[in-house]
Image (tube, helix red, strand yellow):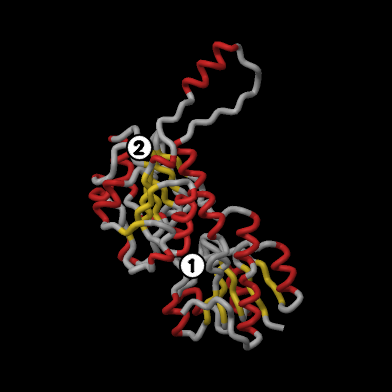
Amino acid sequence: MPTVLVAEPLAPDCVTWLRERCTVIERPFSDTPTNPTFNEALAQADALIVRTYTAVNADLLAKAPKLRVVGRAGVGLDNIDLHACRQRSVRVVHTPGANTDAVVEFVVACMLDATRHRLYLQAPLAETDWNKLRDELVSERQLSSLTLGIYGLGRIGSRVARAAAALNMRVIYLDTRDIDPAQRHGATPVDRETLLAQSDIISLHVDARPENRNLLNADAFGRMRSNAVFINAARGFLVDPFALAEFMIAHPRATAIIDVHEPEPFGPDYPLLDIDNIHLTPHIAAATRDAKTAMSWVVKDIWKVLSGEPPEHEAL
Protein backbone atom coordinates (compact mmCIF):
# COMPACT_ATOMS: atom_id res chain seq x y z
CA MET A 1 0.00 0.00 0.00
CA PRO A 2 1.28 3.51 -0.76
CA THR A 3 2.09 5.77 2.17
CA VAL A 4 0.44 9.19 2.51
CA LEU A 5 1.77 11.79 4.95
CA VAL A 6 -0.88 14.22 6.22
CA ALA A 7 0.91 17.35 7.45
CA GLU A 8 -2.11 19.44 8.50
CA PRO A 9 -5.57 18.48 9.78
CA LEU A 10 -8.18 17.08 7.39
CA ALA A 11 -11.85 16.23 7.88
CA PRO A 12 -12.02 12.87 9.71
CA ASP A 13 -14.28 11.22 7.11
CA CYS A 14 -11.76 12.00 4.39
CA VAL A 15 -8.89 10.54 6.42
CA THR A 16 -10.97 7.41 7.05
CA TRP A 17 -11.67 7.09 3.31
CA LEU A 18 -7.96 7.38 2.58
CA ARG A 19 -6.98 4.85 5.26
CA GLU A 20 -9.08 2.24 3.48
CA ARG A 21 -6.74 2.54 0.50
CA CYS A 22 -3.36 3.70 1.84
CA THR A 23 -1.11 3.73 4.84
CA VAL A 24 -1.79 7.13 6.39
CA ILE A 25 0.72 8.85 8.67
CA GLU A 26 -0.47 12.02 10.40
CA ARG A 27 2.50 14.13 11.43
CA PRO A 28 2.02 17.89 11.87
CA PHE A 29 4.66 19.99 10.18
CA SER A 30 6.38 21.95 12.96
CA ASP A 31 7.72 25.46 12.68
CA THR A 32 11.17 24.03 11.99
CA PRO A 33 11.86 21.95 8.88
CA THR A 34 14.38 19.92 10.89
CA ASN A 35 11.64 18.22 12.91
CA PRO A 36 12.89 14.59 12.99
CA THR A 37 9.45 13.04 13.47
CA PHE A 38 8.07 14.77 10.40
CA ASN A 39 11.16 14.11 8.32
CA GLU A 40 11.17 10.39 9.14
CA ALA A 41 7.61 10.15 7.84
CA LEU A 42 8.43 12.30 4.83
CA ALA A 43 11.18 9.91 3.78
CA GLN A 44 8.59 7.11 3.54
CA ALA A 45 5.85 9.10 1.82
CA ASP A 46 4.53 8.44 -1.66
CA ALA A 47 2.16 11.38 -1.21
CA LEU A 48 2.00 14.48 0.96
CA ILE A 49 -1.13 16.43 1.90
CA VAL A 50 -0.82 20.02 3.15
CA ARG A 51 -3.08 22.96 3.77
CA THR A 52 -1.80 26.50 4.40
CA TYR A 53 1.31 26.47 6.54
CA THR A 54 3.49 23.65 5.20
CA ALA A 55 5.99 25.05 2.70
CA VAL A 56 6.60 22.56 -0.10
CA ASN A 57 9.90 23.73 -1.53
CA ALA A 58 13.14 22.25 -2.84
CA ASP A 59 14.48 21.63 0.66
CA LEU A 60 11.42 19.64 1.68
CA LEU A 61 11.30 17.72 -1.58
CA ALA A 62 14.94 16.69 -1.16
CA LYS A 63 13.90 14.82 1.99
CA ALA A 64 11.14 12.93 0.15
CA PRO A 65 12.80 10.58 -2.34
CA LYS A 66 9.65 8.49 -2.90
CA LEU A 67 7.22 11.39 -3.27
CA ARG A 68 4.94 11.21 -6.31
CA VAL A 69 2.19 13.71 -5.54
CA VAL A 70 1.45 16.67 -3.28
CA GLY A 71 -2.15 17.52 -2.43
CA ARG A 72 -3.15 20.99 -1.30
CA ALA A 73 -6.37 20.77 0.72
CA GLY A 74 -7.44 24.18 -0.47
CA VAL A 75 -7.34 26.51 -3.42
CA GLY A 76 -4.27 28.73 -3.54
CA LEU A 77 -0.84 27.23 -4.16
CA ASP A 78 1.22 30.00 -2.57
CA ASN A 79 3.00 27.56 -0.24
CA ILE A 80 3.93 25.10 -2.99
CA ASP A 81 6.90 25.63 -5.29
CA LEU A 82 5.44 24.26 -8.52
CA HIS A 83 8.71 24.59 -10.40
CA ALA A 84 10.56 22.56 -7.79
CA CYS A 85 7.82 19.92 -7.91
CA ARG A 86 8.01 19.69 -11.70
CA GLN A 87 11.79 19.30 -11.55
CA ARG A 88 11.34 16.22 -9.34
CA SER A 89 8.35 14.91 -11.35
CA VAL A 90 6.07 15.41 -8.34
CA ARG A 91 2.51 16.14 -9.36
CA VAL A 92 0.40 18.71 -7.50
CA VAL A 93 -3.36 18.50 -7.00
CA HIS A 94 -5.71 20.85 -5.18
CA THR A 95 -9.40 21.71 -4.68
CA PRO A 96 -10.36 24.83 -6.66
CA GLY A 97 -13.86 26.00 -5.83
CA ALA A 98 -14.08 24.07 -2.58
CA ASN A 99 -14.19 27.17 -0.40
CA THR A 100 -15.77 29.67 -2.79
CA ASP A 101 -19.19 29.81 -1.13
CA ALA A 102 -17.64 30.20 2.33
CA VAL A 103 -15.38 33.08 1.29
CA VAL A 104 -18.18 34.87 -0.56
CA GLU A 105 -20.40 34.60 2.53
CA PHE A 106 -17.59 36.00 4.66
CA VAL A 107 -17.10 39.00 2.36
CA VAL A 108 -20.83 39.77 2.33
CA ALA A 109 -20.93 39.47 6.12
CA CYS A 110 -18.02 41.91 6.35
CA MET A 111 -19.82 44.41 4.12
CA LEU A 112 -22.88 44.22 6.37
CA ASP A 113 -20.81 44.43 9.55
CA ALA A 114 -19.15 47.59 8.25
CA THR A 115 -22.35 49.35 7.22
CA ARG A 116 -25.28 48.18 9.39
CA HIS A 117 -25.43 48.78 13.13
CA ARG A 118 -26.83 45.91 15.18
CA LEU A 119 -27.37 45.36 18.87
CA TYR A 120 -28.88 42.29 20.50
CA LEU A 121 -31.11 43.05 23.47
CA GLN A 122 -30.68 41.10 26.69
CA ALA A 123 -33.49 42.66 28.74
CA PRO A 124 -36.66 44.73 28.33
CA LEU A 125 -36.24 48.49 27.95
CA ALA A 126 -38.27 51.46 29.04
CA GLU A 127 -39.99 53.23 26.15
CA THR A 128 -37.59 56.20 26.28
CA ASP A 129 -34.54 53.93 26.20
CA TRP A 130 -36.09 51.87 23.41
CA ASN A 131 -36.66 54.95 21.25
CA LYS A 132 -33.23 56.38 22.09
CA LEU A 133 -31.56 53.14 21.04
CA ARG A 134 -33.50 53.00 17.78
CA ASP A 135 -32.33 56.53 16.97
CA GLU A 136 -28.69 55.71 17.82
CA LEU A 137 -28.69 52.59 15.65
CA VAL A 138 -29.74 54.27 12.42
CA SER A 139 -27.10 53.31 9.86
CA GLU A 140 -25.72 56.01 7.62
CA ARG A 141 -25.57 53.75 4.58
CA GLN A 142 -27.17 50.66 3.10
CA LEU A 143 -25.57 48.39 0.56
CA SER A 144 -28.07 49.11 -2.20
CA SER A 145 -26.91 52.73 -2.29
CA LEU A 146 -23.20 51.89 -2.40
CA THR A 147 -20.64 51.03 -5.07
CA LEU A 148 -18.61 47.86 -4.60
CA GLY A 149 -15.21 47.73 -6.25
CA ILE A 150 -13.86 44.23 -6.81
CA TYR A 151 -10.13 44.04 -7.39
CA GLY A 152 -9.83 40.77 -9.32
CA LEU A 153 -12.93 39.21 -10.92
CA GLY A 154 -11.85 35.59 -10.77
CA ARG A 155 -13.64 32.63 -9.26
CA ILE A 156 -14.40 34.29 -5.92
CA GLY A 157 -14.54 37.88 -7.13
CA SER A 158 -17.17 37.05 -9.74
CA ARG A 159 -19.30 35.31 -7.13
CA VAL A 160 -19.00 38.34 -4.86
CA ALA A 161 -20.21 40.42 -7.82
CA ARG A 162 -23.22 38.16 -8.23
CA ALA A 163 -24.09 38.45 -4.53
CA ALA A 164 -23.68 42.23 -4.63
CA ALA A 165 -25.90 42.48 -7.71
CA ALA A 166 -28.60 40.58 -5.84
CA LEU A 167 -28.35 43.26 -3.13
CA ASN A 168 -28.83 45.97 -5.79
CA MET A 169 -25.33 47.36 -5.42
CA ARG A 170 -23.48 49.07 -8.23
CA VAL A 171 -20.47 46.85 -8.94
CA ILE A 172 -17.28 47.84 -10.73
CA TYR A 173 -14.18 45.73 -11.14
CA LEU A 174 -10.55 45.71 -12.21
CA ASP A 175 -8.92 42.65 -13.74
CA THR A 176 -6.00 41.99 -16.05
CA ARG A 177 -8.16 39.71 -18.23
CA ASP A 178 -10.83 40.58 -20.77
CA ILE A 179 -13.89 38.95 -19.19
CA ASP A 180 -16.95 37.97 -21.19
CA PRO A 181 -19.91 40.18 -20.18
CA ALA A 182 -21.94 37.05 -19.44
CA GLN A 183 -19.42 36.18 -16.70
CA ARG A 184 -19.44 39.60 -15.03
CA HIS A 185 -22.83 39.38 -13.27
CA GLY A 186 -23.51 43.00 -14.19
CA ALA A 187 -20.17 44.36 -12.99
CA THR A 188 -18.57 47.11 -15.08
CA PRO A 189 -14.83 47.08 -15.90
CA VAL A 190 -12.88 50.19 -14.87
CA ASP A 191 -9.27 51.24 -14.52
CA ARG A 192 -7.39 51.22 -11.21
CA GLU A 193 -7.81 54.91 -10.49
CA THR A 194 -11.58 54.76 -11.07
CA LEU A 195 -12.01 51.68 -8.91
CA LEU A 196 -10.12 53.24 -6.01
CA ALA A 197 -11.81 56.63 -6.30
CA GLN A 198 -15.42 55.54 -6.84
CA SER A 199 -15.77 52.50 -4.58
CA ASP A 200 -17.49 52.79 -1.23
CA ILE A 201 -16.35 49.23 -0.51
CA ILE A 202 -13.27 47.56 -2.01
CA SER A 203 -12.85 43.79 -1.84
CA LEU A 204 -9.52 42.31 -2.86
CA HIS A 205 -9.44 39.03 -4.85
CA VAL A 206 -6.24 38.89 -6.88
CA ASP A 207 -3.81 36.00 -7.22
CA ALA A 208 -0.45 35.27 -5.65
CA ARG A 209 1.90 36.19 -8.48
CA PRO A 210 5.01 37.93 -7.07
CA GLU A 211 4.35 41.23 -8.84
CA ASN A 212 1.16 41.62 -6.78
CA ARG A 213 3.13 42.10 -3.55
CA ASN A 214 2.07 45.40 -1.93
CA LEU A 215 -0.43 45.93 -4.74
CA LEU A 216 -2.39 48.10 -2.32
CA ASN A 217 0.27 50.62 -1.32
CA ALA A 218 0.36 54.22 -0.11
CA ASP A 219 -0.53 55.52 -3.56
CA ALA A 220 -3.56 53.23 -3.78
CA PHE A 221 -4.86 54.09 -0.32
CA GLY A 222 -4.32 57.75 -1.05
CA ARG A 223 -6.84 57.50 -3.90
CA MET A 224 -9.59 55.90 -1.81
CA ARG A 225 -12.58 57.64 -0.30
CA SER A 226 -12.18 58.92 3.24
CA ASN A 227 -14.97 56.64 4.45
CA ALA A 228 -14.11 53.61 2.31
CA VAL A 229 -14.52 50.05 3.55
CA PHE A 230 -11.55 47.85 2.62
CA ILE A 231 -11.77 44.05 2.84
CA ASN A 232 -8.90 41.63 2.27
CA ALA A 233 -9.76 37.93 2.40
CA ALA A 234 -7.27 37.01 -0.34
CA ARG A 235 -3.59 37.13 0.69
CA GLY A 236 -1.74 39.17 3.26
CA PHE A 237 1.22 40.18 1.12
CA LEU A 238 -1.04 42.00 -1.34
CA VAL A 239 -1.31 44.92 1.08
CA ASP A 240 1.40 47.20 2.45
CA PRO A 241 0.39 47.10 6.13
CA PHE A 242 2.19 50.33 7.00
CA ALA A 243 0.36 52.20 4.24
CA LEU A 244 -2.97 50.73 5.35
CA ALA A 245 -2.30 51.68 8.97
CA GLU A 246 -1.40 55.24 8.01
CA PHE A 247 -4.55 55.62 5.90
CA MET A 248 -6.85 54.26 8.59
CA ILE A 249 -5.37 56.43 11.32
CA ALA A 250 -5.75 59.52 9.11
CA HIS A 251 -9.34 58.59 8.13
CA PRO A 252 -11.30 57.46 11.21
CA ARG A 253 -14.53 57.12 9.19
CA ALA A 254 -12.94 54.44 7.01
CA THR A 255 -12.98 50.75 7.94
CA ALA A 256 -10.67 47.85 7.16
CA ILE A 257 -11.49 44.18 7.74
CA ILE A 258 -8.39 42.05 7.23
CA ASP A 259 -8.55 38.26 7.35
CA VAL A 260 -5.16 37.37 5.86
CA HIS A 261 -1.81 38.53 7.13
CA GLU A 262 1.93 38.34 6.59
CA PRO A 263 3.19 36.60 8.62
CA GLU A 264 0.62 34.29 10.15
CA PRO A 265 0.32 34.34 13.05
CA PHE A 266 1.53 37.93 13.40
CA GLY A 267 3.48 39.21 16.38
CA PRO A 268 3.23 42.24 18.68
CA ASP A 269 5.02 44.42 16.12
CA TYR A 270 2.29 43.95 13.49
CA PRO A 271 1.50 47.48 12.23
CA LEU A 272 -2.26 46.89 12.02
CA LEU A 273 -2.71 46.24 15.74
CA ASP A 274 -4.48 48.67 18.08
CA ILE A 275 -6.09 50.81 15.39
CA ASP A 276 -9.78 51.33 16.16
CA ASN A 277 -11.08 51.16 12.61
CA ILE A 278 -9.02 48.12 11.57
CA HIS A 279 -10.59 44.78 12.43
CA LEU A 280 -8.43 41.66 12.22
CA THR A 281 -9.65 38.09 11.90
CA PRO A 282 -7.49 34.92 12.03
CA HIS A 283 -7.73 33.70 8.41
CA ILE A 284 -11.26 32.35 8.75
CA ALA A 285 -12.97 33.32 5.49
CA ALA A 286 -13.07 29.66 4.43
CA ALA A 287 -13.69 28.38 7.95
CA THR A 288 -16.93 26.48 7.58
CA ARG A 289 -17.31 22.78 8.17
CA ASP A 290 -18.66 22.31 4.64
CA ALA A 291 -15.69 24.11 3.07
CA LYS A 292 -13.11 22.27 5.16
CA THR A 293 -14.67 18.94 4.22
CA ALA A 294 -14.77 19.86 0.53
CA MET A 295 -11.10 20.85 0.65
CA SER A 296 -10.18 17.65 2.49
CA TRP A 297 -11.57 15.57 -0.37
CA VAL A 298 -8.28 16.30 -2.15
CA VAL A 299 -7.61 12.75 -0.95
CA LYS A 300 -9.57 11.48 -3.97
CA ASP A 301 -7.15 13.09 -6.41
CA ILE A 302 -4.23 11.85 -4.33
CA TRP A 303 -5.56 8.32 -4.71
CA LYS A 304 -6.13 8.76 -8.44
CA VAL A 305 -2.51 9.77 -9.00
CA LEU A 306 -1.23 6.91 -6.84
CA SER A 307 -3.46 4.53 -8.82
CA GLY A 308 -2.20 5.75 -12.16
CA GLU A 309 -5.40 7.60 -13.06
CA PRO A 310 -5.69 11.24 -14.20
CA PRO A 311 -6.67 13.55 -11.31
CA GLU A 312 -9.63 15.91 -11.56
CA HIS A 313 -7.80 19.05 -10.39
CA GLU A 314 -4.09 19.17 -11.18
CA ALA A 315 -2.02 22.33 -10.93
CA LEU A 316 -0.32 22.68 -14.29
- Identify the residue position indicated by label 1 in the image: 55
Residue closest to the far right = 20
Q: The residue under label 1 is which amino acid type?
A: Ala
Please name which of the two marks, 2 or 1, marks the residue nearer to the observer.
2
Which mark is drawn over residue 254?
A: 2
Which mark is drawn over residue 87?
A: none
The picture places residue 314, in percent across and down from the top left corner, at 52, 78
Q: Looking at the image, which residue is at 74% across and 68% down?
A: 16
Q: The residue under label 2 is which amino acid type?
A: Ala
The picture places residue 67, in percent across and down from the top left corner, at 57, 81
Residue 293, located in which quarter of the rendered image?
bottom right
Q: Is residue 29 left or right of residue 55?
A: right
Q: Is residue 242 visible?
A: no
**The one of 175 and 78 positioned closer to us in this rendering:** 175
Does residue 162 lie above or below 6 as drawn?
A: above
Residue 26, located in which quarter of the rendered image?
bottom right
The picture places residue 160, in percent across and down from the top left corner, at 46, 54
The picture places residue 121, in percent across and down from the top left corner, at 61, 24
Q: Looking at the image, which residue is at 65% across and 19% down?
A: 123
Does residue 312 lie above or below 27 as drawn?
A: below
Q: Looking at the image, which residue is at 49% across and 71% down?
A: 56
| Other-residue count near label 2 (Cα within 10 Å), few / some / many at <14 / 14–19 / ≥20 | many
Q: Looking at the image, which residue is at 70% across and 68% down?
A: 15
Q: Is residue 157 left or right of residue 193?
A: right
Q: Is residue 99 visible?
A: yes
